[in-house]
Amino acid sequence: RHRLMVVPPDFHDEQRLLTHKLRISGCDVDIERSYDTFGNVVLDLGLEHVERDVTFTTWAVVERESAVDGRDTPDAISSDQRFCDPSRLTRPDEALCAVAAELQKTGARGVELAEQISSRVYDHFEYRWGLTEVTTTAAEAWAAGVGVCQDYAHCMLTLCRLCELPARYVSGHVLGDGGSHAWVEVLVRHPQDEGALQAVPIDPTHDRHATLRYLTVAVGRDYCDVPPTSGTFDAPYGGTLTTQKRAAVTRVDYVRPPRRRRPGPVRTA
């Protein structure tokens, strides 16, 4: 059995899925598509026999829109307690609790507090690949002071939740080659709906807000909810996994904002 979480959602704030394809070579496969409790697309694959290897190739075209003249209305998100509570990989220890207490003393709230948390994580870490695993907890990564994007994200999630900021893990891509990427969406009060929240995407690995260069694939409490690929197989030998990704812009449409009428002389009869 194999599970893929590589297809972007139909809609995610201003991101819209236009089309996607999945090609599998190397064996016959039964595919079952479903949605998890977070709304992510899940592909469960049944492979009875693999002679040597199996290759999954997926394409997706998404559309991203930027605000015109700053008049965008973010999607309204219902409150979800799962994004407030510690998860398997974001359970805090004394060190992270102490950092959260320091951050709360600044008096910052909402997005400002989230930005301070991102900067604190960014300043604490040295980006080094190969020293942590997908099972490394936020507490373990913080103690080591080194890690990759998922470690940055897990530590920011932990601190956000300790500071009473709901936040969720995002798995996706940044334009260019390389692997997948992880960042955080902090859930703050919606500007037009007092009973709802809006997602503010922040990338602590680079200490910046996620821009149109970021493509969301799945969201969850931590990495455990959204691994791009997972599964099991039965064989008398081990296996290897290799991945390759490329994300690029295919077209840009410019929308001219409406012209503002200049005030002129007032005519009187």
Image (cartoon, grey):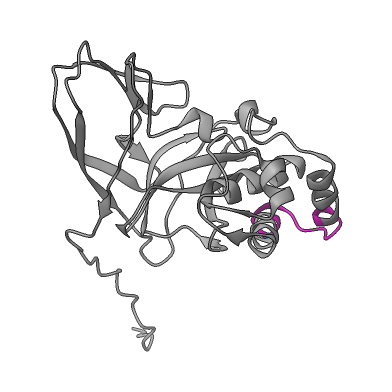
Number of numbered callouts drawn: 0
Residue at left 85%, top 42%? 94
Going by the picture, which residue comes out furthest to the top?
Answer: 48
* Residue 39 falls left or right of residue 185: left
* Residue 145 falls left or right of residue 223: right
- Front-most of residues 52 and 54: 52
Residue at left 67%, top 57%? 121
Task: Give the answer, above or below, for where 241 lies relative to 110.
Answer: above
| Residue 160, quarter of the rendered image | top right
- Front-most of residues 124 and 70: 124
Task: Give the answer, above or below, for where 259 lies relative to 160.
Answer: below
The quarter of the image holding the N terminus is: top left
Residue 43 in the image: state x and y as whole percent: 30, 23
The quarter of the image holding the C terminus is: bottom left
- Front-most of residues 167 and 146: 146
* Residue 247 falls left or right of residue 163: left
Going by the picture, which residue comes out furthest to the front?
Answer: 236
Residue 222 in the image: state x and y as whole percent: 56, 35
Residue 242 in the image: state x and y as whole percent: 30, 41
Residue 62 seen anywhere in this rendered image of the structure: yes
Which range is magenta?
103-113
Residue 165 seen anywhere in this rendered image of the structure: no
* Residue 35 falls left or right of residue 137: left
Residue 260 in the image: state x and y as whole percent: 34, 75
Q: Is residue 108 magenta?
A: yes
| Residue 132, quarter of the rendered image | top right
Task: Give the answer, above or below, for where 32 lies relative to 104.
Answer: above
Q: Is residue 191 magenta?
A: no
Residue at left 62%, top 33%? 83
